[in-house]
Amino acid sequence: MEAGSILNSVIPWKPKRSLSLKPSNFPRFVRASSNPQSQEQKSGYRGPKPTKDWVADWVRNNDDAVRSLPIYVGGASLLAVLFNRTVSGIAPVADASSAQSRADLLTLSLAVTNILTGLVWLSIRPKSISVVNPEGVECRNISSRLPDLVVSELLWAWESLSTVTCCRSLVAIYDSNCILQIGMAAESGNDDEYVTVDASKLMKGSVYQGVMRSGSQSYLANLLLYPGRSELSFLPSNTQAVILQPLGDKGIAIIGGDTIRGFTTSDQAWIAFIGEKLDAALSKYANAVPLVVQDGI
């Protein structure tokens, strides 16, 4: 009875604290400033500040004057030695036993060295790299047996590369067939015709075999210095740089540029991802061969 009366009895609950949901100190409005400099001026920037090399900036902005400076210094030193020799009353003939003559000879040699150094600096200048217009004709060949999805992927790759990078030519070889040749191509003997890609001949060459053997991207920054450029005869004769990007283990993408060392490291990494994307799209339709090239698609 006592246990039942205890369970049935109502226990009054009176909390000692009342929960207040009214935020007293919380700000109701936050004002956003569109000028971050004003906030930095108020709070103060405590991070590392960029340093400026004033000497390097001055040399870069006055390149011609810096290259000519040794000539002026050497010429002034030479005139100073001759003037000192004239007014000092020493015989103009050099005497090995005279300390003054030995000092003058050493000074003259240093002055002549400065003059020659200035002449060398003026004659040797870094070659300016400029964009070269490819000597060839425009072409647009896409395999007629490719599905629309793959064609759109190839055209997207071409438009992206030609817009963002220095790419002016794009050739794609996949499963022993040339599925794409777009952009500038080498001009053949006939008027308004271009050199088509012979996939079987290209695959037997050292360029294709080397890329497929390594399985990684190959960048020919200056194609004119590369002896294997004869295997890329379908590209314009004055193509400046070429990237050879493997498409999995079944093909390769050949990207020709119009500038020496025009493809940056970011471009190379991005082209590698594009190659993987094209390989994923083409591998789904690898059985759709033979792939016949058709013009004007």
Image (cartoon, grey):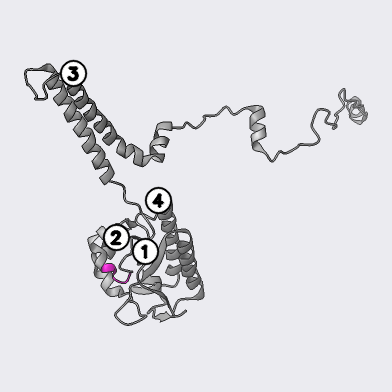
180 and 264: which one is in front?
264
Label 4 close to label 1 by CB (< 8 Å)? no
> If you read the primary sequence from the N terminus, does the residue marked by circle 1 or circle 3 appear first?
3
Q: In x, y percent, where is residue 293?
A: 39, 79
**Residue type pointed to by label 3:** Ser
Instruction: Categorize mark 2 by other alpha carbons within 10 Å: few (<14), some (14-19), many (20+).
Output: many
> If you read the primary sequence from the N terminus, does the residue marked by circle 4 or circle 3 appear first?
3
Residue under pointer 1? 256
- Residue range highlighted in magenta: 231-235
Q: In x, y percent, where is residue 48?
A: 52, 29
Q: Secondary structure at mark 1?
A: strand
Give the numbered dot on residue 88.
3
Label 1 close to label 2 by CB (< 8 Å)? yes
Give the numbered dot on residue 44.
none
Residue under pointer 2? 223
Residue under pointer 4? 265
Tell me: residue 212, above or below residue 99.
below
- Distance from Cα at disc 4 to Cα at disc 2: 17 Å
Disc number lying in front (1 or 3) = 3
